[in-house]
Amino acid sequence: MKNNSFYGTNATHVGGKGELFHDWYPYLEGYSSTFVESVKNKYLSKAKCILEPFAGVGTTPIKLAQQNVVCYYCEVNPVLLHLIKAKSEILNLTDIKKKILIKQLIDIKENINRITKLKKSLPLIRHYKILFNKSIFFERSNFNKILQLKTFSDKIKNNNILKSILDISVYSSLLKSSLLKRAGDVRFRTKNDLKKNKPDDILLLTKKKIELILNDIANLKERVKSPKFFIRNAKDLIKKNFKKFDGVITSPPYLNGTNYFRNTKLELWFMNFINDKINLRNFRDQAITSGINDVNQKKVKNTLKEVKDIYNKSLINAYDERIPKMINDYFYDMKLVLLGIKNNIKKNSCVCIDIGDSIFNKIHIPTDKILMKIAKNIGFKILDRVVLRKRLSHSKKPLNQVLLVFLNK
């Protein structure tokens, strides 16, 4: 009999709605803390120290911390890293500091409209013009308020956690206040979209998010130790030899063409993580090659034997010449990660990976099965392959989301 907490929507972002910390940032690629708990209980019940190579919004490290399990994590996206660090710091607040923070946040929430008297952030304006040229992502009123919110945030000195929560409340609200929408990837709203739903006021959205965060802080039951940052890039795990971890729970990027960094470009801009010196390309080159725009034609990566057949099939009538390279480079990068994981976990430790398959140009890419072959060839034993839920491709072809479990022999 299936454990209901292990399958279906619990393995998705939607399944975590209402959970502590979960709704701070709308990250559709994530899963619920209930799912993390179920995986941990089934495969890593005795684990005391776990690695999360693709932390995302921090669901795994935060949930494990609340269960008194030490979790080290990796994350390339600086916005998500900022989010995890803020959540982690709140977990470790004393009751006195928590009360002070709640009082400060209530004051900001009740006086949020006063920011309209502030000057607009000139650096943010300059970076917008450099990064986005003539693209208009916001109506004028919201754009001005965002610039003023940035000025207000920059004025907060010597209180990192207060500033972080304000920043999170703003950048998690940017998409809803913009002329863009999330439909798989982020794109412009159509005229019909705008007729049905106009961009929400950024101040109202920010106020609501502060209320949500206040509620979560108030509901924290006890102080726990924060998760530990390990390294930014999971591909660099291969350079470490920690041999300390009792296992892994993670969900790497899916090979589905998703523009993970472009989908957070507004947040990266607001936080000055992309500016006149750093653009999206910098981050795409660090990340797992999972989307078309991640492909770097200058970097040649060997074709893995486990991928050769699929790679050759994808060369036939590919509607975009980058697709075959994206497929090959994805598995090349993931092999690096698996080798790095093997370097850093103890013998007989389990590696639990949530992953999905893909279809490109009518060619099915069995991501899970290829990863299983790679894992086996580098010395892992395949313990389990659990179908978590059925999915559909853009062309309405059936796909799966699965949990892979490997044992480090």
Image (cartoon, rainbow, N blue to C red):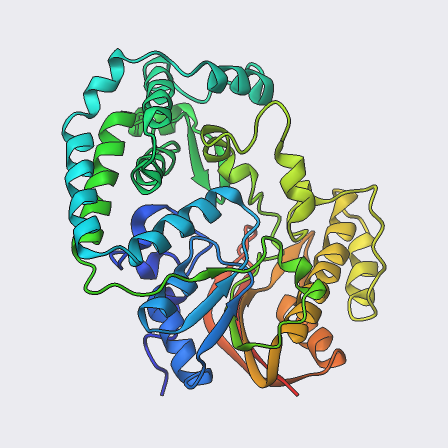
How many numbered discs sit on the rendered protein? Answer: 0
Could you say which is closer to the camera, residue 143 or residue 98? 98
Classify residue 399 as left or right of residue 307.
Answer: left
> Residue 333 location in percent, x, y?
71, 59
- For image coordinates 76% across by 44% down, the residue present is 322
Up-down relation of residue 212 to residue 236 (above or below): above
**Which residue is found at the position 53% from the left and 55% from the top?**
396
- Residue appearing at x 15%, y 32% in the figure: 107
**Residue appearing at x 46%, y 13% in the figure:** 122
- The C terminus lies in which quarter of the figure? bottom right
Q: Position of residue 407 (x, y in %)?
A: 60, 84
Please tell me in which quadrant of the rendered image residue 332 appears: bottom right
Is 258 located above or below residue 196 in the figure?
below
Image coordinates of residue 142 in percent, x first then y, are 33, 19
Would you identify the image quadrant in which residue 260 lies? Answer: top right
The one nearer the camera, 24 or 138, is 24
x, y percent for residue 227: 42, 62
Query: In the visual, does 50 lie left or right of 168?
Result: right
Apparent side of residue 55 relative to residue 19 in the rendered image (left or right): right
Looking at the rendering, in which quadrant would you find the N terminus?
bottom left
Q: Is residue 266 above or below residue 119?
A: below
* Closest to the observer, 239 or 317: 239
